[in-house]
Image (cartoon, grey):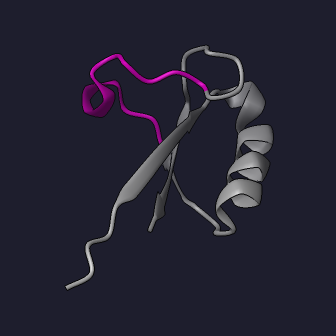
Amino acid sequence: MDEQTRQAWYACENHIEVVLDQLVDEEGLAPDLFPFSEEEAEGKAVCRWCGGRPAYRLTVEH
């Protein structure tokens, strides 16, 4: 049975396009895009580009 893993990247409002482009370049897949929720990340998530407070969660299944 194939086990799929879901990788999450986070992006702030200012860097969503940069992070999205980087994710597609690295993974070769278009991600699912969701509004960021503090509850799900328990305060540990930061924007992948600047380290600021995220506004979006991008996920890719492998």
Residue 11: give x, y in percent of width and height: 62, 33
Report the span colored magenta.
Answer: 35-47
The correct choice, above or below, for 55 with respect to 52 in the image is below
Q: Nearer the viewer, residue 53 or 25?
A: 25
Q: Give the residue displayed 19% in from the left and 85% down from the top.
A: 1
Q: In terms of image quadrants, where is residue 19?
A: top right
Q: Which residue occupies the extreme bottom position in the image?
A: 1
Is 46 one of the magenta-colored residues? yes
Q: Give the residue displayed 64% in from the left and 67% down from the top.
A: 30
Q: Give the residue displayed 68% in from the left and 51% down from the top.
A: 23
Residue 25: give x, y in percent of width and height: 77, 57
How many numbered discs, if any? 0
> Left or right: where does residue 50 sit relative to residue 34?
right
Q: Nearer the viewer, residue 51 or 17?
A: 51
Is 19 one of the magenta-colored residues? no
> Left or right: where does residue 2 sit relative to residue 30?
left
Quarter holding the C terminus is: bottom left
Secondary structure mostly seen in the magenta stretch: loop
The correct choice, above or below, for 58 with respect to 46 in the image is below
The correct choice, above or below, for 59 with respect to 3 in the image is above
The correct choice, above or below, for 6 with respect to 57 in the image is below
Q: Nearer the viewer, residue 25 or 35?
A: 25
Residue 4: give x, y in percent of width and height: 32, 70
> Left or right: where does residue 25 sit relative to residue 43?
right
Q: Give the residue displayed 55% in from the left and 30% down from the top.
A: 55
Q: Which residue occupies the extreme front position in the image?
A: 1
Residue 26: give x, y in percent of width and height: 70, 55
Q: In terms of image quadrants, where is residue 27?
A: bottom right
Q: Nearer the viewer, residue 61 or 43?
A: 61
